[in-house]
Amino acid sequence: MLELIKRLYPICRSITGGGVRQTLDILESHIAIERHEIASGTPVFDWTIPDEWNLSRAWIKDSAGNVVVDTAVHNLHVVNYSEPQHATMSLEALSSHLHSLPATPDWIPYRTTYYKRDWGFCLTDRQRKSLRPGMYEVVIDATLAPGHLTWGECYLPGESDREVLLSTHVCHPSLANDNCSGMALLTFLAKHLRDRRRRLSYRLLFIPGTIGSIAWLARNEARVGRIDAGLVASCVGDRGNLTYKRSRRGNAPVDRAVERVLQASGRSHRIVDFVPYGYDERQYCSPGFNLPVGCLMRTPNGEYPEYHTSADDQSLVSAEHLADSLQTYAEVCVAIEEEISRDAGDGRSATLLQTRSHQADRATQTTGARDDSPRYVNTQPKCEPQLGKRGLYRATGGSNHPGATQMAMLWLLNFSDGDHSLSHIGEKSGIDPILLTHTADLLVEHGLLVRV
Ligand code: ZN
């Protein structure tokens, strides 16, 4: 897995473009992958497949002709999805397009601008402070034009056509733990599963984050009913303990399987409830799908200081921890098959289980004082609605945590299924009730929620 990470790490990936195809080429030297493409401009639920971005090189030169920032040195130096650019400007004009991290002055941040035409450079704060007033030449030699979104699928049929969905994102450029580790883990898990008896079928997805899972769900909507369990793999190579984030259902076979394996391991681990923030589980667990998909990782996104910076390099991942993650995933696959055959033996179907959990949830809500706080229904329950095009989401992505209002939107959209009241969402999320109420009003104004 470390060898594979070494090959994947230098590639300038994004949500579309040659970097994803090159990545799939490398993974294909290990496992059979079926490639899928969707043309730019194609609608997928509330989203549209964006133009394809391909970068040759981007650099900044000072007035003496010295190259001071250069993607040939590190591909995080350009804001991912920057529009092409060639201009000469003062440092003052340039500075609004520069991103650095004063608290960690030797690290380059990872920033993206997928859905808003913009451009920029990321650099260490030390580099930034060394820039003297004067004129600078900036070049972003890139194309941003109609093309395709690409993803890969590895399907391993089993005795039953009921499926386990395993998903990882393939859109991050040179970042090792997030998420070369996830790609390496799923590749080696596929090699392991390929040679074993499989009661269930396994579908491994290598997809660009967010838009990739949305596109996959849009294309496979009629078939998602056969998914009995699923896991999103990200951040699986760092030295932290394993963390499991439950599916939105909370008690699905995958939840029981992972918890059982982690408990039996006797090692420190953490199990957390579903939150509507993270990776592609946000889409799989959107209320219109509510698939039994959890997220098994080591240190979660945003919780390690190197996250989304150049310090998430190959020194952050270790063979020992990758191996431990892979071993755990392999054991979880066995445990999932056991849980599902046990359910089948008991005559319990996944639907029935879901109903029970739903009833339990309702019971919890009705045991306390009468809950007369308002309830809403999400009008776009299949995947997250695209908040950016409504001016409801920050344009530049990549920073550690969204703002409080954005978190409130994600909670309201995910849990406004008519069953969860505003005060119940407040309890689950810990978000201030006033902020939650204001945010619900905002989403109603934009037609994303209706009061019931
Ligand atoms: Zn990430």
Image: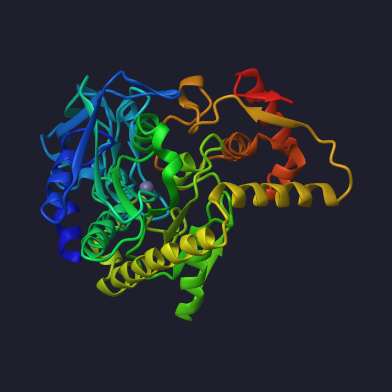
Classify the position of the C terminus by image quarter: top right
Comparing 20 with 42, the one in front is 42
Residue 282 position, x and y percent, is 48, 42
Residue 128 quadrant: top left
Above-or-below relation of 161 to 260: above
How many dots with numbers? 0
Residue at x-position 36% and y-position 56%: 200
Comparing 40 with 258, the one in front is 258
Q: Is 50 left or right of 271, judged from the image as shown?
A: left
Comparing 371 with 72, the one in front is 371
Residue 308 position, x and y percent, is 36, 50
Residue at x-position 30% and y-position 28%: 119
Residue at x-position 85% and y-position 36%: 372
**Residue at the right extreme of this rendering:** 369
Above-or-below relation of 201 to 426: below
What kind of colouring is applied to the model shown? Answer: rainbow
Q: Is 348 left or right of 85, judged from the image as shown?
A: right
Q: Is 268 left or right of 143, judged from the image as shown?
A: right
Residue 226 position, x and y percent, is 42, 44
Residue 314 position, x and y percent, is 24, 62
Residue at x-position 61% and y-position 19%: 447
Task: Answer yes or no: is residue 120 visible.
Answer: yes
Classify the position of the N terminus by image quarter: bottom left
Q: Is 251 left or right of 425, judged from the image as shown?
A: left
